[in-house]
């Protein structure tokens, strides 16, 4: 009888254990859902207050110059909210492996306000890019965006097309 109970307990324990792969997949799914929701709220809804809780305190945006801290990261992205009306941010594809994410996105908007010190041009923009992000404890720890800045500046009318 003791052996039967021991075997039953062992089987139950093994059945309830998740593999590291399963845990990683669950973490990735959770991070994708959260991260996608954050950027929908920030850019499409224009509510940057979500960033107060979305970033870790020592978050880093790998830009030039580098942005450090969640308050500065929030201020960085508020430029998009202030600078553009008719904003539409679309996540075209997103992939994750645990706490690492890659997001392929499209941003559209009309430049109707100051944007990083650039006065409104009234021009429409439509750019695509990729963001690599790292999460920590369910929050954004690092981000690096890649997009065609020359095309972006040309669409704003700041650099002539050749």
Image (cartoon, rainbow, N blue to C red):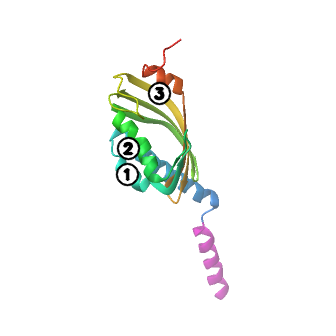
Where residue 130 appears, x then y in whole percent? 54, 36
Q: Is residue 9 magenta?
A: yes
Give the residue at mark 1: 50
In three-dimensional space, the C-alpha distance between marks 2 and 3, rounded to whole angstroms, equals 17 Å
In three-dimensional space, the C-alpha distance between marks 1 and 3, rounded to whole angstroms, equals 24 Å
Q: Main secondary structure of the magenta part?
A: helix
Assign a secondary structure to mark 3. Answer: strand
Q: Residues within 10 Å of mark 1 (few under 14, many from 20)?
A: some
Question: Vertically, is 80 above or below 16?
Answer: above
Among all residues in the image, which is located at the extreme bottom? Answer: 2
Task: Give the magenta-colored segment's residue range.
Answer: 2-17
Give the residue at mark 3: 127
Mark toward the start of the polypeptide (2 vs 1)? 2
Where residue 134 appears, x then y in whole percent? 56, 50
Assign a secondary structure to mark 2. Answer: helix
- The residue under the point 45% across, 45% down is 36
Quadrant in the rendering for residue 111: top left
Q: Are marks 2 and 1 in contact (CB under 8 Å)?
A: yes
Question: Vertically, is 45 above or below 117?
Answer: below
118 and 29: which is toward the camera: 118
Where residue 98 appears, x then y in whole percent? 58, 53
Give the residue at mark 2: 42
Q: Is residue 157 magenta?
A: no
Assign a secondary structure to mark 1. Answer: helix
In three-dimensional space, the C-alpha distance between marks 2 and 1, rounded to whole angstroms, equals 7 Å
């Amino acid at each position: 009888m003791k052996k039967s109970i021991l075997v039953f307990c062992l089987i139950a324990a093994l059945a309830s254990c998740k593999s590291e792969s399963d845990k990683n997949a669950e973490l990735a799914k959770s991070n994708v859902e959260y991260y996608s929701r954050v950027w929908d709220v920030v850019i499409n809804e224009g509510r940057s207050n979500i960033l107060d809780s979305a970033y870790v305190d020592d978050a880093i945006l790998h830009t030039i110059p580098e942005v450090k801290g969640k308050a500065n990261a929030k201020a960085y992205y508020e430029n998009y909210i202030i600078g553009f009306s008719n904003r539409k941010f679309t996540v075209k594809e997103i992939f994750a492996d645990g706490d690492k994410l890659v997001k392929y996105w499209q941003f559209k908007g009309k430049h109707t306000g100051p944007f990083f010190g650039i006065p409104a041009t009234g021009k429409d923009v439509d750019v695509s890019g990729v963001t690599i992000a790292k999460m920590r404890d369910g929050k954004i720890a690092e981000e690096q965006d890649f997009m065609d800045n020359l095309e972006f500046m040309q669409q704003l009318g700041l650099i002539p097309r050749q």
